[in-house]
Amino acid sequence: MSATNISVTATEEQLLYAKILEKGMYFGLLLMFVTFALYVLGIMPAIVPKDMVAEYWNLPVGEYLETINHNYIGWAHGPTGWSWMKLIGNGDFLNFVPIAILSGVTIICYAAIVPGLFQRGDKAYGIMAIAEVLILALAASGLLAVGH
């Protein structure tokens, strides 16, 4: 059989996954533009002054968070995990929301296809999709910490 005779069709679950992924991606991208505009136009206050941002670009994330905590936030312990959510009233941290949404869309996609997989009798893929949802959700939760 030659490659030109192969018919490729997507399953309902693949189409549903792609549809949710597309909508989530566009929503996250739109939100990224909106939150960045709120930050850049100064509509929302920022923790790190815009004229100081370039000084921190070269720092690894952990060091960046320690430095801005020391210089601007003043918490007993710097922001880690999801603690940045306490700071979303500030334009520079509000920008993290669309990133979190874009990162989490895959979890929603997998969760959405689980019922269809089981209805179709595809238990193995259904179980794998549930496992994927659980693993990704656990990873995103921040409950697993390495090196602390």
Image (cartoon, rainbow, N blue to C red):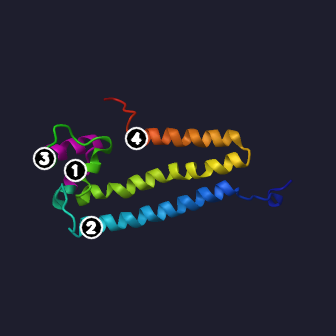
Residue 135 appears at what percent x and percent y?
Answer: 50, 38
Task: Give the label, 2 or 4, closer to the camera.
Answer: 4
Q: Amino acid at mark 2?
A: Leu
Q: Is residue 106 above or below residue 80?
A: below
Q: CA distance from mark 2 to mark 4?
A: 27 Å
Q: CA distance from mark 2 to mark 3?
A: 23 Å
Residue that mark 1 sits on: 56
Q: Residues within 10 Å of mark 2 (few under 14, many from 20)?
A: some
Q: Amino acid at mark 4?
A: Ser
Q: Residue at x 68, y 45 (%)?
A: 118
Task: Give the label, 1 or 4, closer to the camera.
Answer: 4
Q: Residue at x 29, y 50 (%)?
A: 85
Does dot 3 land on a helix, a strand or a loop? Answer: helix
Q: Nearer the viewer, residue 83 or 3?
A: 83
Does dot 1 land on a helix, a strand or a loop? Answer: helix
Task: Give the label, 2 or 3, closer to the camera.
Answer: 2
Q: Nearer the viewer, residue 68 or 21?
A: 21
Please give left or right for residue 139 compared with residue 39 in the image: right
Image mark count? 4
Q: Is residue 21 above or below residue 114?
A: below
Residue 27 appears at what percent x and percent y?
Answer: 45, 64
Callouts 3 and 4 close, C-beta under 8 Å: no
Query: What stretch of residues is rendered in magenta?
Result: 54-71
Residue that mark 4 sits on: 141
Q: Which mark is residue 71?
A: 3
